[in-house]
Image (cartoon, rainbow, N blue to C red):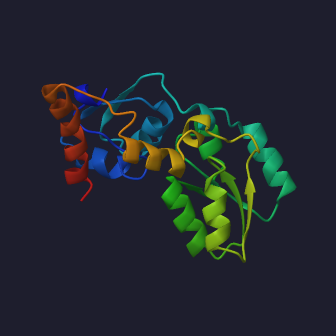
Amino acid sequence: LKRNADVCVTSSNALKIVKALPNKYIYFIPDKNLGRYVAEQVPEKEFIFNHGYCPVHAKLTKEQVLKAKEAHPNAVLLVHPECEKEVVEEAVYAGSTAGIIDYAGKSEKTEFIIGTELGVLYDLRKNNPDKKFYPLTETLICSDMKKITLDKIIDSLEKNTFEVDLEEQFAKEAHAPLVRMLELAK
């Protein structure tokens, strides 16, 4: 996919990069929800979305949000922009994982409902022991993220396992949109 892209983005830099692009038309893949979130903030550009999405964020519903808000009436909702629009609209903040951590740390509020992968709760609670964090649901676990562990990374580096060999031209083409992302994100 990267080999055919003009530029890559992350949830933390997508808005900045799309604004910096000279293109009027943006084909935003793979996450339709992140693309929609960016498109709403850049109305001067026209977007085309595919139907891809993050399965963890896309399964959150407005009903779950309302239930969590009822259970924690003093808490504010912080979500990832890869959530469905109706969930993002209920939040006081939508942003990347790092953005959520930063927002909660700087906020004068002391209670938060978190609408992203449960792993972020560790950092939130460690960095803000005087604040309370509630997961939007207990099912926000990304099984793919949990496959990556420090032990597996060390093992792979020490034993040169799981190496992916690509033809030089293929790798060069896939590397170009990453380089462009870093340039535009400055």
Which quarter of the picture shows residue 129?
Answer: bottom right
Q: Residue at x 39, y 47 (%)?
A: 158
* Residue 108 visible in this rendered orientation of the protein: yes
Q: Residue at x 52, y 29 (%)?
A: 53
Q: Is residue 40 left or right of residue 126?
A: left
Query: Picture coordinates of residue 16 (x, y %)?
Result: 32, 52
Q: Is residue 66 above or below residue 166?
A: below
Q: Residue at x 59, y 31 (%)?
A: 55
Residue situated furthest top in the rendering: 51
The quadrant the N terminus occupies is: top left
Number of marks present in the image shown: 0
Q: Nearer the viewer, residue 149 or 169?
A: 149
Residue situated furthest front in the rendering: 159
Residue situated furthest left in the rendering: 169
Query: Picture coordinates of residue 107 (x, y %)?
Result: 60, 73
Q: Is residue 92 above or below residue 152?
A: below
Q: Is residue 175 left or right of residue 149?
A: left
Q: Nearer the viewer, residue 86 or 17?
A: 17
Query: Picture coordinates of residue 65 (x, y %)?
Result: 74, 45
* Residue 23 visible in this rendered orientation of the protein: no
Q: Residue at x 20, y 31 (%)?
A: 171
Which quarter of the picture shows residue 92?
Answer: bottom right
Query: Picture coordinates of residue 86 (x, y %)?
Result: 64, 38
Q: Nearer the viewer, residue 98 or 47?
A: 98
Q: Is residue 176 left or right of residue 152?
A: left
The quadrant the C terminus occupies is: bottom left
